[in-house]
Amino acid sequence: MEDMNDELRPEYDLTNLKVRRVGIGRKMLQENEIRLDMDVARVFRDSESVNEALRTLIRITDQHRKEFPSK
């Protein structure tokens, strides 16, 4: 094993650091990961199609609430 010549001080405690993936496939910091069931994933192939479908559902739901407000 090569001798690593770093400047890390012995008093640094790195045991509580969280490891984060780098490169392709890593999650962005502000992304939420949602897993779709296989039957749903067959219809919605990417996040754009899922988001558009959910936005449509939101618009329909909002319109329904305006037309039929609860008592």
Image (spheres, grey):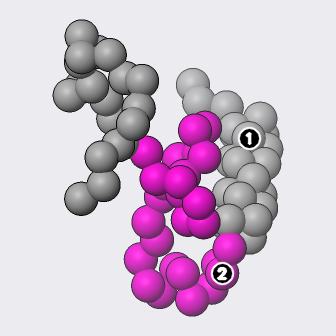
Could you say whether the residue bearing mark 2 is in a helix, strand or loop? loop
Disc 2 marks which residue? 45
What residue sits 24% from the left and 17% below the top? Answer: 10
Q: 64 or 11, which is in the foreground? A: 11
Q: Name the amino acid, label 2.
A: Arg
Q: Nearer the viewer, residue 12 or 71?
A: 12
| Magenta-highlighted residues | 20-46
User: Predominant secondary structure in magenta?
Assistant: loop
Q: Is residue 55 visible?
A: yes
In screen coordinates, is 49 left or right of 4?
right
Q: Residue at coordinates 59% horizontally, 60% vertically from top-left? A: 23
Q: Amino acid at mark 1?
A: Asp
Residue nearer the viewer, 65 or 1: 1
Q: Would you say residue 64 is visible in this rendering?
A: no
Tell me: 30 left or right of 7. right
Residue 15 position in % (x across, y down): 20, 28
| 26 relative to 68 in the view: left or right | left
Alpha-carbon span between mark 1 and mark 2 = 26 Å
Residue at image location 63% in from the left, 85% down from the top: 43
Which quadrant would the N terminus be assigned to in this image? Answer: bottom left
Check residue 62 in the rendering and tell me which mark sits there, or answer none: 1
Q: Is residue 60 left or right of residue 9?
A: right
Q: Is residue 32 magenta?
A: yes
Residue sitting at the far top? 11
Which mark, by number, is residue 42? none
